[in-house]
Image (cartoon, coloured by chain):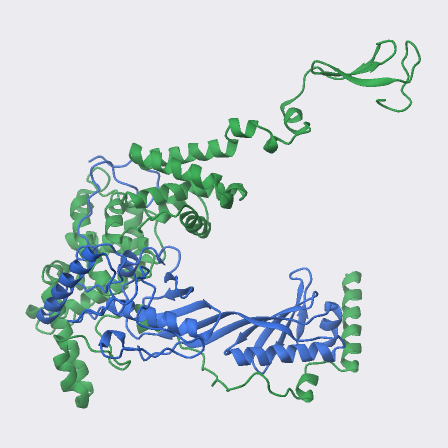
């Protein structure tokens, strides 16, 4: 019986059954064979996939055809590899990683957004495995995704697939970063142009100096790269035109996005250069300011090891003169095994987080308790409202609620 | 070498084929050390004196012979002239073959002879303890929020009452099932006392609260080694345990295997240890990491 009450118009019988004629559903009278009504011959794609008794994910077609998101993801991986001009081997590796990660239970049910980001993370991991320098910020720009999300997905992916992807060292990133700067003679004025090779070389030395002075560890790499390239550009030809350029204008000229952190790094790097520049013997003790130091960068970098040693020894002497009783011990400490520094003695270069340490909240002295002490009733009562308070509170809430209703 | 035809917002595009060699490697701890499994302290070549050079060469020779035998070196190998004995067959650098820890007391070294096994002298301070307890009865959160002074309850935001007491300064999340989470205490005993006070408050509000299955779930400690640390070097030699992504977080995340503790190591020398169930794990983890960190210290 298909539906109750349906009568065959030919013979009047109530025995109507569902009988499909190939793919066309029909209601047929069981006694005389007359077709009472019939459905559509064709079906839409969504009806086919959603109107079936067996769910698509449980059917065998899932095994035969990879799902659409997987195909899209693989296309995305390939597109990213082409944009970044990676080798064929790396493209294959990235694709393999993506397939493995996608089908892993950790990733098969995540949101589409995460699956998109997963493609970028696979490319990033492959680049790191093959020592191809690429920053996470690049993947961020390419995917236009939240850096935090990329970080989360990347770390989970590395853990799931158990791959070892050593992070890129900043000096390798410098070369690729430098090439984004459009400073060749065809792009800018002759006086302002600089070849990529010279720029990279000078910036690399500056970056090494910054790393020694603790300006690089623990911080975002891109701003410090920008800062070192800017200072390299200024110092390679320290003419007035170049010196007048601010970092923002430089980035605009070189067609690179500017960052808000890079100016701070420029200041810090100039401070370090000033400290070393102070030791140049032909200055005879003249002040070296951040404005005048650019012209001397050439000399500073050529003789930086000597200047470093001299700066260290003069710093030691300065400290020794401040504390004469411990002075003699520390003066000899220059060449022997590094002694444990007390918090009072400061070395010449320190990470900025140490130098400008946040003022900690005053620590409340820890009271020794056993955990099983008596709890006084009065203390507990202080946490409980009196009946009067409860009444007041309820009234106030009702008054607020009624005034809200009136509004 | 043609310029990349790149879109403006890119930074750091990959170079075309052939230009992959980096300029000059600044962090080159890979050279003298082989497998990276043995946690070797790394010295920077910039300001080495003659004495340190000698020690380093001797150490390398000893390592070469040790690696041939396939046994990892002892953990606390700071640039010393002697080679600490390899005691156990453990292959994980997170182990201290020289120490055995008792759960609740700070460790004392067994072999005080070699300076490498000397304890650091720094004790991590506990900063936060998270514990849970079952009050054993269903609770009406609206009543609790109405009748307690120190409670807040916003069911649209979170399905629990947030209660605070002044001494010990802690916060508790009380759920309608009767389970409670207590956070903010600075020691295990304080956490227990605080949990008992919350249970007493709930009792006074008229519920038959008990104090069942009190358990410490997590302990967080922190300390300062008082010297700056080269995180880039540490992540290269301890790759299996460390994760250092300066673009995401300024500290290095070190996942120690034994004991199972996560350490956040910062360039300033501050170390945060978390994930412990007992105090001894925090102390043990710090004693394990201290010799490794000492190897990455660089005085400029």
Residue B45 appears in the figure: no
The C terminus of chain A sits in image quarter: bottom right
Residue B8 appears in the figure: yes
Q: Nearer the viewer, residue B67 or A52?
A: B67
Specify the quadrant of the image occupied by residue B263: bottom left
Seen as rendered, the residue at the extreme left is A282
Chain drawn green in the picture: A
Vertical relation: B191 (above or below) A76: below
Vertical relation: B40 (above or below) A68: below
From the top left corner, tell me how far across and down residue A11 is, in percent. 92, 10
Vertical relation: A152 (above or below) B105: above
From the top left corner, tell me how far across and down residue A96 is, in percent. 39, 36
Chain drawn blue in the picture: B
Q: Nearer the viewer, residue A297 or B263?
A: B263
From the top left corner, tell me how far across and down residue B247 is, in percent. 37, 55
The N terminus of chain A sits in image quarter: top right
From the top left corner, tell me how far across and down residue A175 is, in percent. 23, 46
Report the side of A407 relative to A234 (left or right). Answer: right
Seen as rendered, the residue at the extreme right is A12
What number of labels is visible? 0
Specify the quadrant of the image occupied by residue B120: bottom left
Specify the quadrant of the image occupied by residue A53: top right
Q: Nearer the viewer, residue B72 or B176?
A: B72
Report the side of A216 relative to A281 (left or right). Answer: right
Q: Nearer the viewer, residue B27 or B62?
A: B62
Report the side of A266 relative to B64 (left or right). Answer: right
Q: Residue at x 46, y 50 (%)?
A: A149
Q: Residue at x 52, y 41 (%)?
A: A108
């Amino acid at each position: 019986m298909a539906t109750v009450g349906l009568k065959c118009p030919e013979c009047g019988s109530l025995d109507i059954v569902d009988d499909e004629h190939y793919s066309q559903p029909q209601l047929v009278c069981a006694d005389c064979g007359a077709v009472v009504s019939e459905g559509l011959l064709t079906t839409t794609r969504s009806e086919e996939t959603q109107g079936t008794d067996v769910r698509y994910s449980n059917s065998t077609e899932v095994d035969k055809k990879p799902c659409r998101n997987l195909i899209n993801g693989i296309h995305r991986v390939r597109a990213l590899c082409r944009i970044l001009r990676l080798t064929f081997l790396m493209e294959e590796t990235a694709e393999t990683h993506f397939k493995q990660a996608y089908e892993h239970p950790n990733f098969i049910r995540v949101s589409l957004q995460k699956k998109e980001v997963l493609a970028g993370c696979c490319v990033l991991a492959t680049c790191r495995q093959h020592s191809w320098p690429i920053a996470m910020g690049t993947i961020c720009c390419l995917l236009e995704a939240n850096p935090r999300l990329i970080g989360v997905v990347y770390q989970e992916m590395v853990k799931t697939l158990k791959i070892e992807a050593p992070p890129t060292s900043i000096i390798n990133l410098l070369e690729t970063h430098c090439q984004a700067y459009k400073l060749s003679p065809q792009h800018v004025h002759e006086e302002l142009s600089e070849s990529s090779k010279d720029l990279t070389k000078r910036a690399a030395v500056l970056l090494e100096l910054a790393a020694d002075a603790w300006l690089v560890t623990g911080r975002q790499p891109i701003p410090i790269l920008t800062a070192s390239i800017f200072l390299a550009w200024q110092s390679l030809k320290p003419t007035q035109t170049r010196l007048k350029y601010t970092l923002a204008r430089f980035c605009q000229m070189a067609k690179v996005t500017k960052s808000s952190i890079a100016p701070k790094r420029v200041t810090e790097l100039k401070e370090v250069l000033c400290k070393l520049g102070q030791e140049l013997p032909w200055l005879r003790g003249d002040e070296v300011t951040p404005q005048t130091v650019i012209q001397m960068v050439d000399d500073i970098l050529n003789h930086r090891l000597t200047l470093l040693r001299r700066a260290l020894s003069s710093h030691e002497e300065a400290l020794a003169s401040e504390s004469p009783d411990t002075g003699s011990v520390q003066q000899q400490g220059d060449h022997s095994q590094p002694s444990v520094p007390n918090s009072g003695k400061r070395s010449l270069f320190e990470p900025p987080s140490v130098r400008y340490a946040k003022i900690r909240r005053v620590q409340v002295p820890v009271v020794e308790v056993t955990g099983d002490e008596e709890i006084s009733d009065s203390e507990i009562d202080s946490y409980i409202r009196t009946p009067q308070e409860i009444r007041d509170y309820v009234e106030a809430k009702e008054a607020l609620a009624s005034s809200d209703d009136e509004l | 070498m043609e310029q990349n035809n790149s879109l403006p917002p890119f930074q750091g595009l990959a170079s075309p084929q052939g230009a992959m060699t980096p300029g000059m490697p600044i962090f080159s701890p890979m050279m003298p050390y082989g497998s990276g499994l043995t946690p070797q302290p790394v010295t920077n070549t910039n300001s080495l004196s003659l004495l340190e050079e000698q020690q380093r060469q001797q150490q390398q020779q000893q390592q070469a012979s040790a690696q041939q035998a396939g046994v990892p070196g002892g953990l606390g190998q700071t640039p010393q002239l002697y080679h600490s004995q390899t005691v156990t067959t453990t292959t994980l650098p997170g182990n201290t073959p020289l120490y055995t820890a008792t759960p609740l007391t700070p460790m004392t070294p067994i072999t005080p002879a070699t300076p490498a096994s000397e304890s650091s002298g720094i004790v991590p301070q506990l900063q936060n303890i998270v514990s849970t307890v079952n009050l054993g009865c269903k609770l009406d959160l609206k009543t609790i929020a109405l009748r307690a002074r120190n409670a807040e309850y916003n069911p649209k935001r979170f399905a629990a009452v947030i209660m605070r007491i002044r001494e010990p300064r802690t916060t508790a999340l009380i759920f309608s099932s009767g389970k409670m989470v207590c956070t903010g205490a600075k020691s295990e005993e304080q956490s227990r006392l605080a949990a008992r006070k919350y249970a007493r408050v709930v009792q006074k509000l008229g519920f038959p609260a008990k104090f069942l299955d009190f358990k410490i779930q997590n302990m967080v400690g922190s300390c300062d080694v008082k010297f700056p640390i080269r995180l880039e070097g540490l992540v290269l030699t301890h790759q299996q345990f460390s994760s250092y992504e300066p673009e995401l977080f300024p500290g290095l995340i070190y996942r120690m295997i034994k004991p199972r503790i996560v350490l956040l190591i910062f360039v300033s020398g501050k170390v945060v240890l978390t994930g412990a169930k007992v105090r001894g794990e925090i102390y043990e983890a710090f004693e394990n990491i201290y010799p490794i960190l000492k190897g990455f210290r660089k005085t400029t």
